[in-house]
Image (cartoon, rainbow, N blue to C red):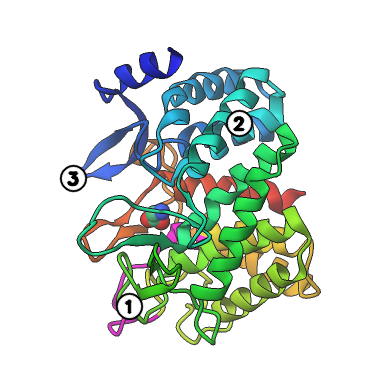
Amino acid sequence: MLQNILLAKDEKAELISPRTIENGKLKLVPSKDWTSGFFAGQLWYLYEFTRDKKWKAKADSFTLLLEKEQFNASTHDMGFKMYNSYGIGYRLTKNAHYKAVIIQSAKTLATRFNKKTGTIRSWDHHADVWDFPVIIDNMMNLELLFAATRLTGDSLYYNIAVSHANATLKNHFRKDYSSYHVVDYDTITGNVKKKMTHQGFADESAWARGQGWALYGFTMCYRETKDKKYLHQADSIAAFILHHPNLPADGVPYWDFNDTAIPAVPRDASAAAVIASGLYQLSKFSKQSKEYKIAADKILTSLTNNYRSAIGENFGFILLHSTGNKPAKSEIDVPINYADYYYLEALLRSKK
Ligand code: GLY
């Protein structure tokens, strides 16, 4: 019943969250957009920083606008949408309703798991190009599954997350620990059919935000499982990023490490923010703790001093200069909500 009411409301595709600035105008998105949870998440982080009830009230109301997404099985982006809103909200408030939504969201995400491939399907679009596409970004959605097992005691979600992480570790990486963007699986044999890019410069390139998702994702998997192979993977990804000859001196990557037009290409502040937040977390577990903290501090200092919007400008976005999808000529050198989300998260982690 609740499901039907919520999905019927979706037909109106109400715009509920700021995403970016497009042609000088604020772009708002409906709850089904993959970035719809980041604004609520930022409000939760402002509450965590300040403990001011004003931010809690706003965070509660923007979180509840995402309600129907708990039943949306047409996407893998459930973790981005629901963990970064309801998940953070639950951590800070222990609101029982948020707990119920987290569990239902994980249940819905679990329907996209395929036993043969051992992975969660990322996209349903471009069915002519891919059979069963899995993108490196999908590592980020596993946090929701780990949370659901903690909240329910049901190991189903944990097991799916571990299976997906293991398959990704095996199939998504090159020898230098850079990651492919898309891996397409054969659902009959479970084998990999092809490895390619969708948002990067080339199939064999290292798309910057994808490397960030990989670093953050395997660090989180180590935190949740204490399986040493995830820590080794996260350390190796960090080494790839931090020692890459094309990483600029300020630590904010170009949108793709292998764009042949470097240095005359856009940066991606969102990738920098994801990497900084991931490095702070990894510094809690790794022997290279000091190196990671220094690197993360450098990135945050660069973002704060040179990539930040003036207060009161740019519709309130915090960071400028992110790149969403360069091959699609979309969101190039703009503010984007997920850059601000991971920047705030990194700032909080830098203080802990
Ligand atoms: N998950 C989509 C992106 O990183 O652009």
The residue under label 2 is: 103
Q: Which is nearer the eye, 305 or 163?
A: 163
Residue 153 relative to residue 144: left or right: right
* Residue at which label 1 appears: 203
Mark 2: few/some/many CA within 10 Å (<14, 14-19, 20+): many
Q: Give the range drawn in magenta.
A: 258-272
- Residue 216 visible in image: no
Q: Considering only vertical position in the picture, is 125 above or below 295? A: above
Q: Which of labels 3 and 1 is toward the front?
A: 1
Q: What residue type is labelled 2?
A: Ile
Q: What residue type is labelled 3?
A: Asn
Q: In this view, does 332 lie above or below 38?
A: below
Which is more toward the observer, 58 or 2? Answer: 2
Query: How many numbered dots are placed on residues in this image?
Result: 3
Alpha-carbon span between mark 3 and mark 1: 30 Å
- Distance CA(mark 2)–CA(mark 1): 36 Å
Instruction: Tell me where residue 166 appears, x and y as whole percent.
Output: 61, 66
Residue 189 horizontal/vertical position (percent): 43, 69
> Residue 260 in magenta?
yes
Q: Mark 3 points at which residue?
A: 23
Quadrant of the frame with the N terminus: top left
- Residue ID at (42%, 73%): 192
Q: In terms of image quarters, where does ligand 1 lie?
A: bottom left
Q: What residue type is labelled 1?
A: Asp
Residue sitting at 21 percent across and 42 percent down? 24
- Pointer 1 local density, CA inside 10 Å: few below 14, some 14–19, many at least 20: some
- Marks 3/1 in contact by CB < 8 Å: the verdict is no
Between the residue at mark 2 and the residue at mark 3, the CA separation in whole angstroms equals 38 Å
Disc nearer the start of the sequence (2/3): 3
